Image: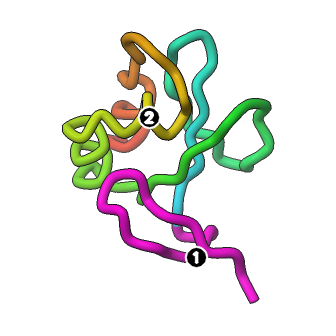
Amino acid sequence: MEPVRTCIGCRSRAPRSSLLRVVAQQSRVLADESAVLDGRGAWLHPTLECFRLAQRRRAFGRALRLQGELDTSDLEKRLNG
């Protein structure tokens, strides 16, 4: 049985394979394609809709347990294609 994770944007549960893991490194939020980067991770559907919901809800800082401003521009570029 495949592990289930919760998207920090829409808050729906989904199989791990359908979500994108994100981590923060030096206050930049990065996509962790292979889910092996060090640090606390959070899970997000790889869509702009869920990305924007997570931004609006300020879910990145809360899920990654970080204070202050987080730069999500790299992740947004990756989701835009």
Q: Can you say which quadrant of the picture contains the C terminus?
A: top left
- Left or right? Give the position of 81 relative to 25: left
Q: In terms of image quadrants, where is residue 31?
A: top right
Identify the residue at image location x=40%, y=11%: 68
43 drawn magenta = no
Marker count (numbered): 2
**Badge nearest the viewer, 1 or 2:** 2
Q: Position of residue 35 (x, y in %)?
A: 72, 48
Which is more N-terminal, label 2 or label 1? 1
Residue sitting at x 51%, y 17%:
28
Residue pointed to by mark 1: 15
Rendering coords of residue 52 (x, y %): 23, 43
Nearest to the observer: residue 38 or residue 33: 38
1 left or right of 5 in image: right
Q: Secondary structure at mark 1?
A: strand
Label 1 with label 2: CB-CB less than 8 Å: no
Q: Quadrant of residue 73?
A: top left
List x then y, in percent, for residue 12.
38, 71
Real-space CA distance between mark 1 and mark 2, rounded to the nearest whole angstrom: 22 Å
Whether residue 81 is situated above or below residue 16 in the rendered picture: above
The numbered mark at residue 46 is none
Q: Is residue 38 above or below residue 16?
A: above
Which residue is rendered at x = 58% and y = 76% of the image?
A: 15
Which numbered circle lies on residue 62?
2
Instruction: Specify the farthest residue to the bottom.
Output: 1
Pick the quarter of the image with the N terminus: bottom right
Tell me where the magenta segment starts and ends, as one range.
1-18
Kind of residue at disc 1: Pro
Q: How is the image coloured?
A: rainbow
Query: Residue at 29% across / 53% down in the picture?
Result: 50
**x, y percent for residue 39:** 73, 31
